[in-house]
Image (tube, rainbow, N blue to C red):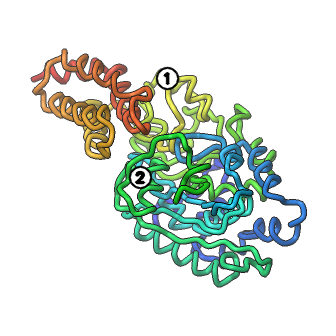
Amino acid sequence: MHPAKARVPHSKEHRVVLSYFHKENSHTLKVYEAEGGYAQVKRLLVTEKDQWSPNAIIDEVKKSNLRGRGGAGFATGMKWSFVPKDGPEPKYIVCNADESEPGTFKDRFMLEEIPHSIIEGMIIAALALNSEQGYIYIRGEFYKGWQRVEAALAEAYAAGYLGDNILGTGRRFHLATYRGAGAYICGEETALLESLEGKRGHPRLKPPFPAFKGLYASPTVVNNVETFATVPAVFRLGGEAYSKLCKGNEKSGGTKVFSISGHIQNPGIYEIPLGLPLKEVIEIAGGLRPGRTLKAVIPGGSSTPILTAEDVEKAVLDYEGMAAVGTFLGSGGLMVLDDTTDMVELTHRVAHFYGHESCGQCTPCREGSRWVSDVMHRVRDRHAEVADLDTLLSFAGNMGNGTTICPFSDAVVMGVTPIVKKFRGDFVAHLQAK
């Protein structure tokens, strides 16, 4: 059993989405149904069908203040409401399971251990949007996750939760998986849709947005694995009750699953109420190794601006709390760094990753990502001068702020330049030691 699954839940966790994650065979229909699985589909479609119009379902999601758990943080209910659900075009539900953000691994384990929660969430989304077809786009490297999802889909079809006549109601919804080929850019929703259509994974110009012209130029909702897995919990608890699980700002509803790694004693995935102080969350994960002091935290995956130890003292782990200290909650890939961290090597690796993963469609990103990577490579190898740090910051400033089709270029800037600015002394000392 993987340590991420076997770990005993911490007393300050609030497992709503992961309520049965730790149980043996949690990926099977038998265990999921024993935990109340698919009860919300039955409720919305059979026992209380007259009370749950598509608009009523969307309103309940809005009450929950559930925001996209993949990184963008856009209000889920609002996103669903944009879809013209009464038009003649087919409507599509797409799950973004192309988790590729360095430092983030929660979706991988959710695919492997609680696939039925994801499926039930997608069925509820289909009821809200009058959709008859959905797709789960899975990162190609997640072979076990793909196998588990395929097995779960077979179980769901056999039990009547999917197909042409769901639970004998005449309602139709089909789900299929699609395996990606390992491109980070396909985590961007429009690049994902291009890939799903069999094209090169290049982001699209927006507008039009996927809600109006998405998969096959039809209305489409794209949500993250965790977002869909949370939807059944929203209806089980009620939208308002779920929202109130947050310990702070009411705009950040519910709980969030975090991938916590780095120089921490108990790394793994944790489901924590939003609104807790970041310092407290680090302690929930076991705190630092004995004798070490905190140097920095990357809060939401490698593309989110780094926080210093001083920043952490005042940081609150929700969407608004992260914005207040100049960063983002992102995908919840929380990386804790102690005083042994080589900030130069860290930055070089981040820059190298983004330099490799740019799709090359936009000039500022294609050229800028490579330049950032090249400069950091020379800094790491002490083939640069201190003045090159200022050069890097200068041309990186021309890469972001909407100069490209998608936010990838901004991610490069946010992932690299805050480290150089906040820990400049480390870089200067490194260069002067040659």
Around disc 2, counting alpha carbons within 10 Å, would you say few (fewer than 14), some (14 to 19), or many (20 or more)? many
In the displayed structure, would residue 354 be above or below residue 113? above
Residue type of the residue flagged with mark 1 = Asp
Residue 298 x, y percent position in the rendering = 43, 35
At 69% from the left and 56% from the top, the residue drawn is: 231
**Circle number at residue 401:** none
Q: Which residue is mark 1?
A: 311
Where residue 276 sits: x, y (%)?
A: 63, 35
Q: Distance of mark 1 from mark 2, alpha carbons?
A: 32 Å
At 43% across and 70% down in the image, what residue appears?
Answer: 144
Q: Is residue 100 left or right of residue 349?
A: right
Q: Secondary structure at mark 2?
A: helix
Location of residue 291 in the rendering, given as x and y in whole percent from the top left corner: 39, 34
Q: 182 or 142, which is in the foreground?
A: 182
- Picture quarter containing residue 75? top right
Q: Is residue 273 above or below residue 57?
A: above
Which amino acid lies under the numbered mark 2 shown in the image of this protein?
Answer: Cys
Observer-side mark, 1 or 2, equals 2
Structural crowding at the residue carrying mark 1, measured as other residues with C-alpha within 10 Å and reported as few (<14), some (14–19) or many (≥20): some
Residue 252: quarter of image = top right
Q: Tell which of 404 and 98 is nearer to you.
A: 404
> Which mark is drawn over residue 186?
2
